[in-house]
């Protein structure tokens, strides 16, 4: 919310989960945040709340959707992006900065403004960010350009990524490139005071592409 | 059912922890013999936890006033003015015993409980911290307890969406059978919209909101005895389970309702549940209360009056509303899917009257429950006199770098990353400095103002000399807040001790409170809230005394705050608060002694409060002027450990000059107080300012571009090598095979 | 009526929790443990007395909410059913 | 041999997860759902052929690691056992 206001000086509309309609929007953001306590499976209960049918309609109309962290989990639960997010390989919640590499993708407002191979430093904070998809599904994701971010550089303990994600996947796009789910939190890397502005860069480029 | 109305006898009272004289007093105040529910209420209200009967006399000596104080001890949490029309509302609380029994749920409900204390006052919580003490690192149970407690704290805090930004952890064998889990929460409120708990207006409805009541955590001592229940098995006291999701809903619903202006008074249900909340609300308002227990939303069938009153189920609140507001309030709670139930009303009678199954289950005058709660002046002795340890008494011929490497692998000094990475320290995106710094720093939303927070206590000092240790905890917190550039404002404290009926334990309690009081007075940081946890013993073995201090401070402009990692090569490194001919240091009760000395208890480093204040203020002013680029207080491990920590936090190294003569181990690892390590680009301005203020300052070296620490001309070690021991200690402890 | 829904991970899906438990058990000296899988067991109390209809409704619940059919299998037990 | 350990919360212990699921099912139109409890099911593959000994060893595993006996009950099923 604050991040979007900071970048666009426009105030996004907040939508209550029990509502059933969604007004026309340039972008719907499903933020992080342990919806429904993450009971059963992360994002499962939220993925069935009344507002979600409207979200499906929005996406079917070609509307853009960004799911961050728990929002990504909700998107996978609703099958709006492929794969699932399971428990971190270390079985622990993990909050830390990670480095992401921008990959080449299908045409997408989320990647069009980013330089390929660019590294972004953005924090993660999750318990279930371990991306999983069947091998043939992974292959498809690769060949169709649906993988937008991968973890690089590993962590200080020598692991390749913070959660065990298949192919170091940190963010995936829907087939048409209009829906993005990502584990890292760009809204937490908005200011030098936060320790970096790469999140702001990503959000700004996405918004420019969407609003132009 | 009727058995509940039967009268009790002294044996029943004794099982609930009442003494003979307390039992007699109950009968006298009541004018008759109490029934089970009434006795349960008296015993809960007169318990150490609710009445502070052993500590009250001494807590009264603490300073609680100051121009910044809006609300001192007595309400759910303390409140101080932080400027800009805002109040910071904060408190710390222990959940030691439940966390030992069930580490995950114990710690999680500890966090939930302290959050309720804060949002009950109308504050939106902005930060959580925790002070933890575990047994020996290699004790069989330690790993299980550490991992359960840490994931429980994260489990609740992460899920409810409040960042956990700091805390402290120590390991010592005295905690093998009795760990400490203290949780602190800080919230923000409009300073003229703070909610209090005193009930007002006879006839106003008393409303129960939140989760349903079950048989969670009912007073163990009483329920364990079969005399009180027919179906002992099913009524067995159960562990409280936290439900952060309901906690979140409750928080949002309460804050929404408070914003509407219909809440007259509100109180969370913490220890002793409905009993303490109803009694405290009525007593503070000088009124009475009548409650129909059949209306209390219950999770289980056939709960007795006693059980309903003593249950410690989580995520519940009691409120008094304006009568006209009941329906709009109900709509708010419906929206958040929470129970909302008018269960009684405020009365003029000054009595607590409870109905159950249509009959009176309890009728007691409220005043005695609070005013006649016993207050003891328990016997105590003189604190032991400790010998001083001379640096020469510890033989250590290693080069500084090698000793340093061993020290950084000490479980009390090693990196806490394994712990704090399990906490979401950034949620809400206002965390400017999370765990790993001297104090955490949280920005006040939509402003540049920041709140600095830390917790501190060094139990080995308190054990050696409780008065010094009590003062030191405040002084160290003062240094941590000052080091980032913030102005200390006030403190909360959590007094963790053994059995107060033992005179030597009572001495620890008294002296450390006196020391804490002295320091709080001299450093202008009044005590605005706190908590006491006594009887922390197993098999007669008391814990190392642990009076934890939680301190908050304020900084007008977060952009001016600094961190504790070096920021550029070439910056000069100084010790503020140290003479330049110093070539020895205080090793008694230090980590160095623990590591390399004998196991005797020696006198801890003395505290000079005037110096603490002068040095802390100096560093703060110089940070705000931009004359200091990074700063770190010198505490556990001494000067050289502080240098290493500043280097590890940065991407630089340092070249340190070492005295030619003297006791190098004392100089390097002594824990003399009131000192800061700082780095400065503009060193002449800093030195001039120090001279002008009469502050001792010593240049000890400079920040270098190589990832190496050099001591003098021959002794060097790579930072990488230090990081390896520093970072691996706790992870390898946690994965070690039994 | 009582219904039990057992939910387990599909063959081939990574089970970090099961692996960790298996390791820990081995570390604790239970060397006979070869493999561990962790699943969920959901007990439902349902106001429906016709077992056939019950089974069908619960299957619907599983498909819509209780299990994520991308990675999980479920099976339904009705203890009172003959 | 295969062993199944079912772990559930003790009577009286709050089950926030079960409650949330029950709510969601009702919201989704499954109004017949009265109550939901969530437990764990752990499937173990164990190199031990004597059912009696197996049961005893698995009970030990439950007490030491698999279940949190302060708030959970467990029961052991050995499908191959006659
Ligand atoms: N239990 C904990 N939870 C969160 N952060 C912690 C915890 N323990 C230590 N930390 C963080 O690790 C850092 C080092 O802690 P400590 O050595 O106690 O600091 P100090 O000596 O400055 O008081 C601090 O930033 C502290 O906030
Ligand atoms: Mg410090």
Image (cartoon, coloured by chain):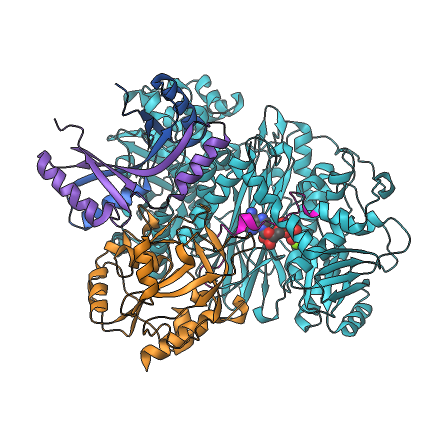
Chain colours: A orange, B cyan, C purple, D blue
Horizontal and vertical percent for residue B252?
35, 55
Residue C27 is left or right of residue B262, and the answer is right
- Compared with residue B538, is residue B146 higher up or lower down, i.e. above or below? below
Horizontal and vertical percent for residue B14?
48, 21
Residue B147 is left or right of residue B327, and the answer is right
Residue drawn at x 28%, y 20% is D81
Between residue B683 and residue A117, name the one nearer to us: A117
**Residue placed furthest toward the right:** B661
Magenta stretch mostly in which secondary structure? loop
Q: Which region of the structure is painted magenta?
A: B408-429
Residue A188 visible (yes or no): yes
In which quadrant is the C terminus of chain B drawn?
top right
Q: Quadrant of ligand 2?
A: bottom right
Between residue A38 and residue B275, name the one nearer to us: A38
Residue B585 visible (yes or no): no
Does the segment drawn in magenta span residue B418? yes
Between residue B411 and residue A152, name the one nearer to us: A152
Does the segment drawn in magenta span residue B459? no
- Compared with residue B408, is residue B439 higher up or lower down, i.e. above or below? below
**Residue placed furthest toward the bottom:** A212
Report the number of numbered marks. Answer: 0
Horizontal and vertical percent for residue B175?
60, 34
């Amino acid at each position: 919310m604050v991040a979007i206001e900071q970048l666009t000086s426009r105030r996004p509309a907040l939508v209550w989960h029990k509502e059933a309609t969604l007004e026309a929007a340039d972008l719907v953001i499903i933020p992080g945040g342990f919806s429904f306590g993450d009971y059963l499976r992360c994002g499962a209960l939220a993925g069935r709340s009344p507002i979600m049918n409207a979200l499906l309609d929005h996406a079917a109309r070609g509307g853009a959707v960004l799911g961050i962290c728990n929002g990504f989990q909700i998107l996978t639960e609703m099958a709006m992006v492929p794969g699932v997010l399971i428990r971190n390989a270390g079985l622990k919640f993990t909050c830390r900065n990670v480095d992401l590499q921008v990959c080449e993708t299908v045409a997408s407002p989320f990647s069009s403004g980013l330089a390929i191979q660019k590294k972004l430093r953005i924090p993660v904070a999750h318990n279930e960010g371990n991306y999983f998809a069947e091998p043939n599904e992974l292959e498809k994701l690769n060949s169709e350009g649906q993988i937008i971010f991968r973890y690089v550089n590993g962590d200080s303990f020598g692991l390749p990524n913070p959660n065990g994600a298949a192919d170091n996947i940190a963010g995936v796009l829907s087939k048409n490139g209009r829906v993005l789910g990502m584990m890292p939190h760009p809204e937490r890397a908005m200011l030098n005071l936060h320790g970096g502005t790469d999140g702001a860069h990503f959000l700004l480029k996405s918004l420019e592409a969407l609003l132009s | 059912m009727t058995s509940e109305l039967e009268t009790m006898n002294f044996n029943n009272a004794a099982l609930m922890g009442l003494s003979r004289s307390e039992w007699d007093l109950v009968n006298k105040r009541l004018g008759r013999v109490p029934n089970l529910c009434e006795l349960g209420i008296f015993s809960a209200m007169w318990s150490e936890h609710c009445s502070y009967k052993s500590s009250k006399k001494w807590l009264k000596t603490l300073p609680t006033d100051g121009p910044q104080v809006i609300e001192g001890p007595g309400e759910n949490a303390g409140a101080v003015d932080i400027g800009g029309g805002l109040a910071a509302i904060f408190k710390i609380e222990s959940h030691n015993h439940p966390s030992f029994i069930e580490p995950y749920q114990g710690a999680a409900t500890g966090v939930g409980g302290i959050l309720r204390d804060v949002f009950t006052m109308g504050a939106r919580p902005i930060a959580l911290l925790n002070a933890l003490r575990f047994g020996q690192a290699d004790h069989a149970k330690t790993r299980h307890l550490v991992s359960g407690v840490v994931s429980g704290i994260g489990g609740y805090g992460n899920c409810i969406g409040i960042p956990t930004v700091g805390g402290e952890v120590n390991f010592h064998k005295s905690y093998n059978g009795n760990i400490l889990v203290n949780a602190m929460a800080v919230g923000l409120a409009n300073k003229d919209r703070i909610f209090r708990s005193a009930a007002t207006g006879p006839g106003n409805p008393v409303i129960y909101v939140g989760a349903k009541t079950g048989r969670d955590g009912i007073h163990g001592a009483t329920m364990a005895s079969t005399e009180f229940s027919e179906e002992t098995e099913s009524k067995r006291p159960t562990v409280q389970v936290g439900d952060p999701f309901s906690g979140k809903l409750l928080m949002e619903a309460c804050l929404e309702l408070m914003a509407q202006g219909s809440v007259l008074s509100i109180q969370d249900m913490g220890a002793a549940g409905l009993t303490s909340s109803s009694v405290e609300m009525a007593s503070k308002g000088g009124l009475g209360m009548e409650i129909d227990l059949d209306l209390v939303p219950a999770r289980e069938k056939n709960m007795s009056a006693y059980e309903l009153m003593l249950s410690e189920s989580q995520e519940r609140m009691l409120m008094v509303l304006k009568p006209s507001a009941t329906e709009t309030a109900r709509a708010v709670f419906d929206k958040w899917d929470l129970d909302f139930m008018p269960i009684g009303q405020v009365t003029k009678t000054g009595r607590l009257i409870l109905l159950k199954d249509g009959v009176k289950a309890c009728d007691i005058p409220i005043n005695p429950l609070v005013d006649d709660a016993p207050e003891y002046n328990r016997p105590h002795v003189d604190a032991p006199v400790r010998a001083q340890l001379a640096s020469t008494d510890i033989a250590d011929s290693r080069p500084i770098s090698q000793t340093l490497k061993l020290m950084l692998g000490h479980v009390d000094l090693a990196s806490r990353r394994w712990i704090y990475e399990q906490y979401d320290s950034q949620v809400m995106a206002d965390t400017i400095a999370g765990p790993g710094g001297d104090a955490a720093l949280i920005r006040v939303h939509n402003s540049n103002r920041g709140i600095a927070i830390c917790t501190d206590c060094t139990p080995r000092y308190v054990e050696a000399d409780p008065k010094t240790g009590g003062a030191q905890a405040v002084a160290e917190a003062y240094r941590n807040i000052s080091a980032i550039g913030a102005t200390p404002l006030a403190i909360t404290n959590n007094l963790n001790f053994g059995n107060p009926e033992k005179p030597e334990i009572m001495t620890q309690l008294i002296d450390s409170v006196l020391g804490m009081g002295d320091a709080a007075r001299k450093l202008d940081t009044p005590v605005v809230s706190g908590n006491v946890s006594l009887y922390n013993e197993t098999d007669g073995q008391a814990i190392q005394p642990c009076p934890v201090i939680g301190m908050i401070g304020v900084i007008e402009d977060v952009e001016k705050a600094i961190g504790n990692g070096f920021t550029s090569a070439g910056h000069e490194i100084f010790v503020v608060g140290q003479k330049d001919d110093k070539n020895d240091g205080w090793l008694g009760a230090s980590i160095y002694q623990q590591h390399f000395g004998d196991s005797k208890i020696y006198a801890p480093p003395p505290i000079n409060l005037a110096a603490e204040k002068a040095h802390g203020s100096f560093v703060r002013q110089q940070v705000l002027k931009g004359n200091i680029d990074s700063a770190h207080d010198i505490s556990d491990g001494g000067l050289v450990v502080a240098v290493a920590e500043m280097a590890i936090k940065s991407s630089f190294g340092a070249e340190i000059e070492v005295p030619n003569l003297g006791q190098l181990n004392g100089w390097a690892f002594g824990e003399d107080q009131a000192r800061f390590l700082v780095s400065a680009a503009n060193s002449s301005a800093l030195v001039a300012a120090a001279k002008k203020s009469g502050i001792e300052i010593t240049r000890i070296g400079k920040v270098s571009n190589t990832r190496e620490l050099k001591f003098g001309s021959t002794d060097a070690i790579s930072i990488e090598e230090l990081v390896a021991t520093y970072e691996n200690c706790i992870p390898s402890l946690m994965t070690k095979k039994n | 009526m009582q219904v039990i829904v057992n939910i387990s991970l599909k063959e081939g899906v990574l089970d970090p929790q099961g692996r960790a438990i298996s390791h820990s058990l081995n570390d604790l000296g239970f060397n006979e443990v070869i493999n561990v899988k962790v699943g969920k067991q959901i007990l439902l109390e349902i106001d429906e007395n016709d077992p056939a209809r019950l089974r069908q409704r619960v299957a619907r619940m599983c498909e819509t909410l209780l299990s994520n059919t991308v990675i999980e299998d479920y099976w339904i037990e009705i203890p009172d059913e003959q």
